[in-house]
Amino acid sequence: MTGWAFLAVSVGAVIGANLRWGLSLWLNGPGHGLQGGTLLANLAGAGLAGFFISWFSHSSLSPEWRLLVITGLCGALTTFSTFSLELMGALQSGKWLVVLASVAVHVLGSLAMVAVGMWLFGLWRPV
């Protein structure tokens, strides 16, 4: 790992983590329901990852840009740990339906958003 690679991941992670935190402050409510900030962070991060992985596969930019955007920004924006903690809280409260719905929406939604991001790149990409 080069110093530039380390810096790229770090800068992207700072941006992504702060975006996720801001979304949580803005959209997550009290209790153990489906948390909108966490969901939006995961879906947006997946969509961005799909778009940018397609973009970088057609780009001659240095690998550090991919590290900044995909590994750093999208990696820190999306959150499996917060999602898991929210699910555990819902499980402990006996909200099984919330847990099942959350898993379905986060996982299937994230897969769909990766596909949407790739599709949008295909529409946007200059020929």
Image (tube, helix red, strand yellow):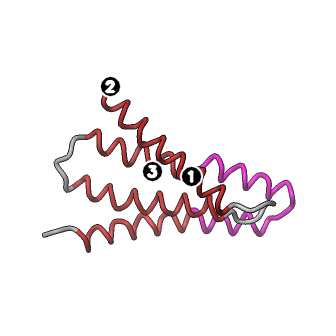
Quadrant, the N terminus: top left
Residue 27 in the figure: left or right of residue 91: left
Circle 2 packing at 10 Å, graded few (<14), some (14-19), many (20+), is few
Q: Quadrant of residue 5?
A: top left
Q: Which residue is mark 3?
A: 74
Under mark 2, the amino acid is Gly
The vertical placement of 7 against 44, above or below, is: above
Q: To which residue does mark 2 refer?
A: 3
Q: Secondary structure at mark 3?
A: helix
State the mark number for residue 71: none
Residue sitting farthest toward the bottom: 123
Q: Residue at x 47, y 46 (%)?
A: 15
As drawn, 59 above or below 96: above
Q: Which residues are magenta?
A: 79-106
The first of marks 2 and 1 along the sequence is: 2
Marks 3 and 2, how far apart in space?
20 Å
Magenta stretch, main secondary structure, is helix
Residue 53, position as x, y percentages in the image: 32, 55
Type of amino acid at the residue the image marks with label 3: Cys
- Image location (x, y in percent) of residue 20: 56, 52
Task: Examine the structure image and report whether residue 100 is included in the region drawn in magenta.
Answer: yes
The answer to which of marks 3 and 2 sits earlier in the sequence is 2
User: Which quadrant would the C terminus be assigned to in this image?
Assistant: bottom left
- Could you say whether the residue bearing mark 1 is in a helix, strand or loop? helix
The front one of 36 and 113 is 36
Which residue lies under the disc numbered 1? 20
Label total for image: 3
Could you give the CA–CA distance between mark 3 and mark 1, rounded to whole angstroms? Answer: 10 Å
